[in-house]
Image: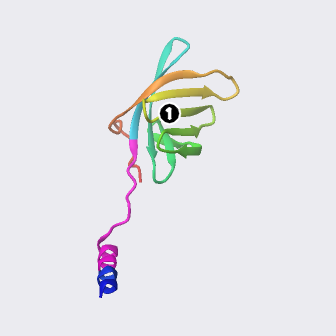
Amino acid sequence: MRLAEVLAAATLLALLSQPALAEPRWLACKFNAGGKEQSFHMVFDDMRGTAALFDGGSLVEGTSTSINFQSLRTRFPQFNITYNRNDGALAVSPVGVGGLMNGECRRAPPPPGAPAVQ
């Protein structure tokens, strides 16, 4: 009798549950490059493991993206980005030049003109 109740409850739960939906998160980031402040918008999606920069009205997707509970790491042709999700710290490392530029990112609404993220 108890087994029938458990099976009925599991079946009901399976019928009523919905798949997890990805929630893209936008970040407004800024860093200092040689005394000049640079800023950009970035969007990432935990469930899909993707990150992209908003540049010139379109999204440029990063490669080798790694997202976990603590950090986001992704590569772009000209630089690598590491974002610490705990304190908002940002590290930008130019490819081939060396060095590390520090900054910060904060949650933000999508910028004006940003394409819809699927």
Residue at 31% over, 86% down: 4
Which quarter of the rendered picture does the N terminus lie within?
Answer: bottom left
Name the residue at the right extreme: 96
Question: Residue 15, relative to residue 56: is it above or below?
Answer: below
63 above or below 90? Answer: below
Q: Nearer the viewer, residue 38 or 14?
A: 14
Question: How many dots with numbers?
Answer: 1
Residue positioned 56% across, 13% down in the render: 34
Residue 61: image location, x then y, percent: 54, 44
Residue 40 percent across, percent down from the top left: 45, 29
Q: Quadrant of residue 97?
A: top right
The answer to whether residue 24 is magenta is yes
Residue at 34% over, 82% down? 7
The image shows residue 23 at horizontal and vertical percentages of 38, 50
Q: Residue 115 is drawn in which quadrant?
A: top left
- Decide if residue 57 is on the left or right side of residue 81: left
Q: Amino acid at mark 1?
A: Tyr
Q: How is the image coloured?
A: rainbow
Q: Which residue is mark 1?
A: 83
Magenta stretch in the rendered image:
9-25
Q: Residue furthest front?
A: 2
18 with respect to 40 (left or right) = left
